Image (spheres, coloured by chain):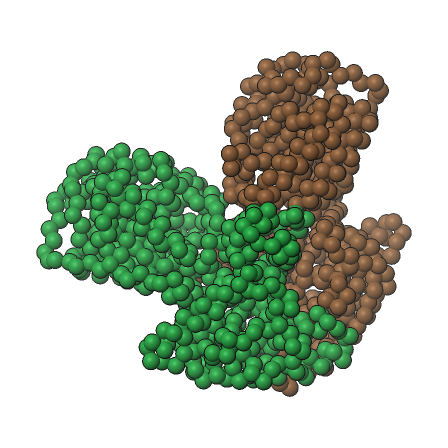
Chain colours: A brown, B green
């Protein structure tokens, strides 16, 4: 089980990664090495799948790779193919220097973050190949999830082992579904089933690995750690010659020359899992896009403190730079808390006072109220971008999902950035994650990164005297519950009221969310961790007069 | 043929629009009134289609509307239905106070800007209803385009008349395809065919109407003007009782009490068509989102001048406000040309000098080179947004497709705005449209809106002394041809070189385009006019190491 982290579009790099892992597998005596879905191209490639030059490059790359892979092992490698002009999501069964067989994904997800009907043409054929006398069936990701589809057809062919490469994005609380499904299908096949998923971040997605091997009984044989790259060598008890294979690769039984003790990785707790998801998503967005350093505006508040702590875990403190940008409305604790954060984590902090810039605008244009508040946020945004341009650092936006939902942010102000690590984290979870991370540090005898006062103090944008979030928003404990049900669960007004939320509150929250769609469209990407993240997971018109009543 | 402009989500307003037009049709003696696809909900509703509350509201609304519509006419009204939990794109055949029959769209487009596999479950049944003795078949939009699909099935039922409601977005040079298709299908059906399309703008789409009626021979009977709302009353020579209908609504033949002379609207020329598309797209984005006024940063250059001229045509000069924001690098003609534009069009112009704001930043942060250039653009962006917030005006971004493609713009600088009218217009077409609009004015004896010097002078961002676009970009005549082939046609490096473009140039342009994906993701929406607009028409990863070689 090669649980690895490819990069979209990097055919050369991904091929090298596959080659190194196949070689290591062969060196360790493996007979089959299974890679994740579309490992050669990275995943998802989106509309690159439609581009002829990319299709051809992928086809050529798989042929070259086939010649380079160790000949005496069977490598199962996902790639993009093009058959009679139709792009296909495929795996190649590679042995002895060539592609011996291919399998095309039959069920294409086209919901949530997936656009596979747009990008691929489905297959409709099962594949069974005999390897060391064992009849091995292959499915790809969604194929496993659909009842009565290609998985049922494969079951009628009674394979002795089923291999499933996946590109399955992390989603909070999704894991148990995976295991339950894998176990159910193994029992249906009455054969062991190996589920291999990729790791790493790709724009707003993060893949958590969590590869699983189960016996025909559904018993877990091995499970790989979440969010970690690596390879697991496992030994399976399989029955030979159970089917009529499409192709015989080898018939002589495989002999195991030693005892393997596969691991069943410790499952992460909820906060730890989410923390890792964001850390990996951020780390990979930064590194895969060629950045080295990130820049964060530090207000002394909890959102920017959390983003900074995540960035330090992802990149190391020497790669994380903070800027405090106090204005005349900033409280004394703002700067103190930013300094405490810097001291706790070791990130570099500088201060740029924004008053003279704000004053310069105010002398040229007459601004009052919200326009003046937004001006301060935009001066901060411009300051961050200026430093970013000057010193080549990626700006991280610090908005959370509650703010993004309600439009409680300033376009081109606090919304600036190349990546927004906590855009899918509701405010209540911002606090929970912060407390969790500090507790982990304390348990380890380390300094907790996030200043306790940043956690405890009342949230404020500090754009006017004595401003509090609660002037504009309902209390977060209630707000986030309404949002979760409206955004993540897609419940309408009546359903929310039936759940017991106050009618006026529901109307107010929904109106805020609907009105802010245009702001979200211009917001940077960030790691999806929820069932429904803002972005390609939730596609709504900006121009819409639909109002939940 | 009711060629009208619904608003997404506005069930009440759209129902009123349908009602008024059905009443007018009945008053004028029509027997059938045909509305565009999903006219009741507006189109496209995107993920609203998946929301239970919206599905229920649409279902309820069509029932209520059925009771209100004139009873003695047959109204064909598109709406969103939900059948056993599956959202469907449907039309209701309404007469005598109720929904007599429904037809569900069978072929769902899922390419380009369309996501219909995501949002709907397809139907699989033809519908033929007898109206005044004529057997009328119905198809919806994409159903008409697919060879050998539901259209062929309907043809075997030999309808005497085929009605097709559409939500077909404008695309340059697309129109002739529509007519050719409508004619081909009419001949296949051996029956007259009526194609009704909506008008109006919806986020980045604009619908151009262009409704068509053809005889069984394919001869054009009537064609509605592009981009104009209205209704055409047409008289068709149809054969009765040609099929076995699913439902008989009425059998007595319809008698025409007078002679109708339907019009065949003048087809717009290329520039006029594109101009109208942008004007309607902009007008509807502004009005449907509840804005009254727009604000444009006027540099004296051609892009902002064109956007201003378009805005004046869309909204009237009194709704268009310009701001000149000279810096120390601005040439004298910058401000003069902005003033000339204001004088020519009557838009309101003010001047805000940005030097003191720029200086304030420069005193606080050390900036050089590109960082300093970007700072000026961002001070302008912040200034525009400040005025926008203070005076409640929608900022229009003035970037063209060439800039957007190459990333030749500053995030949160010149890229700020709620709408970007010319984001799908290459620079060479910016000039062509400007010349065309001026020529129209001259021909009409009016003052040409765009100062000749804005058209003639060499493009410059004026962010450093003597800067020219050509310092950073290839000449636009060549650049735009490479871009059109790379972006709109999806040709890769090798294909471009084979077309005769210089290898180094192709590599340079492609690298610029690929690198700028993250900028485009944060760019405002704007009217799609090309085969492939940036936005949901072209979905590429930001994180990608794919490089066309």
Q: Residue at x 54, y 33 (%)?
A: A83
> Where does the image place residue A368, in percent across and percent down from the top left?
59, 81
* Location of the N terminus of chain A (image quadrant): top right
Q: In the visual, does B91 lie left or right of A318? A: left
> Where does the image place residue A228, in percent across and percent down from the top left?
77, 41
Q: Residue at x 34, y 50 (%)?
A: B178
Q: Nearer the viewer, residue A372 or A204?
A: A204
Q: Nearer the viewer, residue B312 or A106?
A: B312
Q: Residue at x 57, y 72 (%)?
A: B459
In the image, residue A325 above or below residue A169: below
> Where does the image place residue B98, in percent across and percent down from the top left?
26, 48
Report how many numbered discs are placed on residues in the image.
Answer: 0
Q: Nearer the viewer, residue A113 or B239?
A: B239
Q: Residue furthest right?
A: A445
Q: Residue at x 46, y 57 (%)?
A: B530
* Location of the C terminus of chain A (image quadrant): bottom left
Q: In the visual, does A521 lie left or right of B21? A: right
Q: Is residue B108 visible?
A: yes
> Where does the image place residue B349, in percent across and percent down from the top left?
50, 83
Q: Residue furthest bottom?
A: A363
In the image, residue B151 above or below residue B66: above
In the image, residue B489 above or below residue A369: above
Q: Nearer the viewer, residue A343 or B152?
A: B152
Q: Is residue B538 visible?
A: no
């Amino acid at each position: 089980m090669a649980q690895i982290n490819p990069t979209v579009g990097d055919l050369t790099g991904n091929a090298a990664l596959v080659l190194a892992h196949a070689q290591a597998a062969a060196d360790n005596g493996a007979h089959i090495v299974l890679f994740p879905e579309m490992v050669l191209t990275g995943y998802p490639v989106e509309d690159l799948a439609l581009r002829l030059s990319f299709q051809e490059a992928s086809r050529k790359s798989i042929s070259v790779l086939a010649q380079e892979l160790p000949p005496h092992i069977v490598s199962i490698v996902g790639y993009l193919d093009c058959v009679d002009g139709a792009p296909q999501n495929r795996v190649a069964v590679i042995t002895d220097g060539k592609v011996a067989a291919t399998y095309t994904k039959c069920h294409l997800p086209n919901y949530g973050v997936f656009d596979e009907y747009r990008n691929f043409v489905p297959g409709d054929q099962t594949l069974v190949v005999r390897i060391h006398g064992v009849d091995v069936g292959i499915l790809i990701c969604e194929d496993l999830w659909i009842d009565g589809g290609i998985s049922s057809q494969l079951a009628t062919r009674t394979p002795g082992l089923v291999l499933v490469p996946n590109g399955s994005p992390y989603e909070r609380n999704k894991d148990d579904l995976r295991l339950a499904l894998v176990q159910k299908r193994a029992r249906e096949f009455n054969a062991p089933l190996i589920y291999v998923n990729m790791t790493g971040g790709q724009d707003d997605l993060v893949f958590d690995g969590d590869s699983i091997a189960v016996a025909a009984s559904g018993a877990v044989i091995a499970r790989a750690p979440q969010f970690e790259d690596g390879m697991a060598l496992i030994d399976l008890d399989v029955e030979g010659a159970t089917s009529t294979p499409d192709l015989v690769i080898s018939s002589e039984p495989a002999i195991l020359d030693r005892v393997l003790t596969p691991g069943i990785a410790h499952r992460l707790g909820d906060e730890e899992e989410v923390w890792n998801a964001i850390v990996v998503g951020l780390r990979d967005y930064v590194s895969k896009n060629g950045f080295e350093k990130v820049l964060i505006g530090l207000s002394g508040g909890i959102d920017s403190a959390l983003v900074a702590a995540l960035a330090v875990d992802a990149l190391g403190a020497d790669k994380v730079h903070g800027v405090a940008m106090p204005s005349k409305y900033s409280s004394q604790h703002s700067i103190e808390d930013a300094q405490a954060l810097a001291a706790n984590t070791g990130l570099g902090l500088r201060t740029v006072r924004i008053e003279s810039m704000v004053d310069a605008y105010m002398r040229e244009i007459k601004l009052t109220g919200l326009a003046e508040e937004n001006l301060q946020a935009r001066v901060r945004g411009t300051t961050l971008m200026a430093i970013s341009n000057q010193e080549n650092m990626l700006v991280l936006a610090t908005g959370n999902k509650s703010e993004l939902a309600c439009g409680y942010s300033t376009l081109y102000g606090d919304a600036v950035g190349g990546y927004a690590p906590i855009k899918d984290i509701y405010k209540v979870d911002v606090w929970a994650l912060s407390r969790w991370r500090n507790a982990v540090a304390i348990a380890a005898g380390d300094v907790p990164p996030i200043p306790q006062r940043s956690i405890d103090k009342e949230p404020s944008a500090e754009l006017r005297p004595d401003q509090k979030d609660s002037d504009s928003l309902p209390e977060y404990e209630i707000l986030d519950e309404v949002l979760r049900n409206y955004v993540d669960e897609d419940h309408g007004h009546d359903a929310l009221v039936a759940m017991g939320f106050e009618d006026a509150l529901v109307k107010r929250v929904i109106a805020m969310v609907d009105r802010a769609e245009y702001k979200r469209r211009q917001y940077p990407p960030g790691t999806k961790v929820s069932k429904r993240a803002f972005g390609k997971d939730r596609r709504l018109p900006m121009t819409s007069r639909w109002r939940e009543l």
